[in-house]
Amino acid sequence: MESGPNELGAAMLTWRGLAAQADSGQLQIPEGVAFQCDTVCADYVLHLESMLEKTKWLVDTDAYGDLPSARMLGAKFKRLADGEQGSAAAVIRQHIEVIQLMRSVFRRYFVETEAVDQSVGTRIGDIGAGLGE
């Protein structure tokens, strides 16, 4: 499946919209589901980071030979592999950005729950201490 800039941009807009809905309480994801989705996203980011690292080694520019045209061809393929714009590396970085945005939506559900649990635990401890226990 091919992803172009339009698809990645649309994905970013979609997840930003979902983040806004989650922040306003319009979107609810069960904590267990959010945790599982976050775990899958974390694993996928690691996979994408591994792929990103490999883009540095996709092209050996010296393998094309010493002719000026061969050097130009090698440089072109190197830019396509790990250049800044339109390269495989740039697209992988964009995918990582989308996945990290997805994670921010999922993580809010169990991070908030952990904070509430800690707050309640502290309050119960304070009540117990006030009662002399």
Image: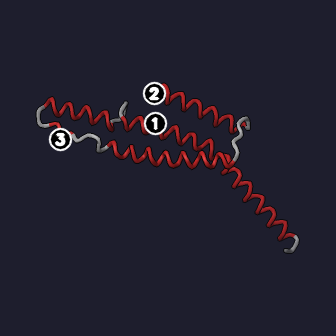
Examine the rendered structure and indicate whether residue 57 appears above or below residue 124: above
- Label 3 secondary element: helix
Quadrant holding the C terminus? bottom right
Viewer-closest of 33 and 94: 33
Which label's residue is closer to the chain start, 3 or 2?
Answer: 2
Q: Name the residue under label 1.
A: 94
Q: Are marks 3 and 2 in contact (CB under 8 Å)?
A: no
Quadrant holding the N terminus? top left
Viewer-closest of 15 and 119: 15
Amino acid beneath label 2: Pro
Viewer-closest of 118 and 102: 102
Mark 3 Cα-neighbour bin, 10 Å: few <14, some 14–19, many ≥20: few
Name the quadrant containing residue 118. bottom right
Q: Mark 2 points at which residue?
A: 5
Amino acid beneath label 1: Gln
Provide residue 21's location: percent of width, then percent of height.
68, 34
Mark 2 Cα-neighbour bin, 10 Å: few <14, some 14–19, many ≥20: few
Name the quadrant containing residue 93. top left
Q: Which residue is drawn at 17% across and 40% down?
A: 63
- Label 2 secondary element: helix
